[in-house]
Image (tube, coloured by chain):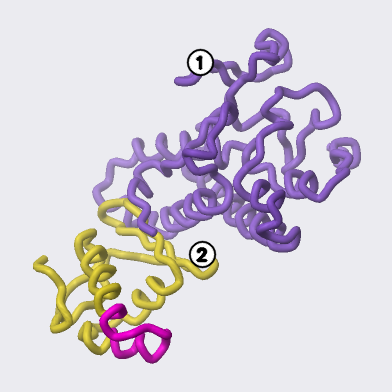
């Protein structure tokens, strides 16, 4: 998968299941048998990606939710999304 | 079994957490515990402990056969040194005043409830196996020969992964905290080789 940008539209990969662990989220790739944990903000991002969502819209939603400037939000979100995609946890629409 | 006879005499709050938990004794967190120089291997063996040669010396296998229903049946008697010196991450955070007794109790209750569920499922899958949870899980994984086994057991695998996350986050020591004592098992087998935070 090429790098995700603000112009990309992404959603959760179908082979990933998840379960809350307090305010974190544990996700497991069924095919690989590996698991990942996300902190509260990462879990929030994941929960917003049940359906395809443009990354720019995701950032806009998060900026309304959290006290963060646009540049920081976009950089952090792109880093998280690209890491998720690199581990096969995301698909692109 | 008469639990009144087994219940340890709890004299301080930290001790009450251990009595409520037992995850470091029952094979949920660790595969084995290390011996200290002052421990007598012959006495341990005579007491029914299963002795092991480990990467770091001599130890005994977990689950400990003296641990029953979250209680140590020899708590008031002689025990290996590690049993009364080991302090998990949760206990250290409580000792340091980072979490309250109620918070620590809540973490223990949530984790033991999940551990009980995982153990029950593990026993269903591998009734004949023994050893720690991780060892049984590995044996179970190796026994799977159908290509879609992970999908068929997805709910159990997610429970196992969630338990490992709770143990990693709240109970296991970070590498720099690990001292001569219980061998720290942080990798939850094939499920959880990667743990992103």
Magenta residue check for A65: yes
Give me the residue at 24% from left, 49% from top: B147
Instruction: Give the distance between the C-alpha atoms of the residues marked 2 and 1, in whole angstroms.
Output: 35 Å
Chain seen in yellow: A
Q: Residue B87: which quarter of the image?
A: top right
Residue B130 visible (yes or no): no
Mark 2 lies on a secondary structure that is strand
Mark 1 lies on a secondary structure that is strand
Q: Which stretch appears magenta? A: A59-73
Numbered circle sitting on residue B111: none
Residue B114 visible (yes or no): yes
Give me the residue at 53% from left, 35% from top: B178
**Image vertical order of residue B147 relative to residue B30, above or below:** below
Callouts 2 and 1 in the same chain: no
Q: Which residue is mark 2?
A: A21
Give me the residue at 19% from left, 72% from top: A91
Q: Which residue is mark 1?
A: B53
Number of numbered discs overlaid on the protein picture: 2
Which quadrant: the C terminus of chain B? Answer: bottom left
- Horizontal placement of B135 versus A48: left or right? right
Where residue A32 appears, as percent x and y from the top left, is: 26, 52
Chain seen in purple: B
Which quadrant: the N terminus of chain B? Answer: top right
| Predominant SS along the magenta part | helix
- Horizontal placement of B185 versus B43: left or right? left
Q: Chain of mark 1?
A: B
């Amino acid at each position: 998968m090429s790098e995700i940008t603000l112009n990309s539209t992404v959603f959760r990969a179908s082979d990933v299941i998840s379960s809350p662990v307090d305010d974190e989220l544990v996700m497991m790739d069924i095919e690989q048998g590996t698991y990942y944990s996300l902190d509260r903000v990462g879990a929030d991002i994941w929960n917003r990606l049940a359906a395809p969502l443009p990354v720019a819209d995701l950032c806009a939603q998060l900026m309304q939710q959290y006290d963060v400037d646009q540049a920081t939000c976009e950089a952090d979100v792109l880093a998280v999304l690209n890491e998720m995609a690199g581990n096969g946890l995301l698909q692109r629409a | 079994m008469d639990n009144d006879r087994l219940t340890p005499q709890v004299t301080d709050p930290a001790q009450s957490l251990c009595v409520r938990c037992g995850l470091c004794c029952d094979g949920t967190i660790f595969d084995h515990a290390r011996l200290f120089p002052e421990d007598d291997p012959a006495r341990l063996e005579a007491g029914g402990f299963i002795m092991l040669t480990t990467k770091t010396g001599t130890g005994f296998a977990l689950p400990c056969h003296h641990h029953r229903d979250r209680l140590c049946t020899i708590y008031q008697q002689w025990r290996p040194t590690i049993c009364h010196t080991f302090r998990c991450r949760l206990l250290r955070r409580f000792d340091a005043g980072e979490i309250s007794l109620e918070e620590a109790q809540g973490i223990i209750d949530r984790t033991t409830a999940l551990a009980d569920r995982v153990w029950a499922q593990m026993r269903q899958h591998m009734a004949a196996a023994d050893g720690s949870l991780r060892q049984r899980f590995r044996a179970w994984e190796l026994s799977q020969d159908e290509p879609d086994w992970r999908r068929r057991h997805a709910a159990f695998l997610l429970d196992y992964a969630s338990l490992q996350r709770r143990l990693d986050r709240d109970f296991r020591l970070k590498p720099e905290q690990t001292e001569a004592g219980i061998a720290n098992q942080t990798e939850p087998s094939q499920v959880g080789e990667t743990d992103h935070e």
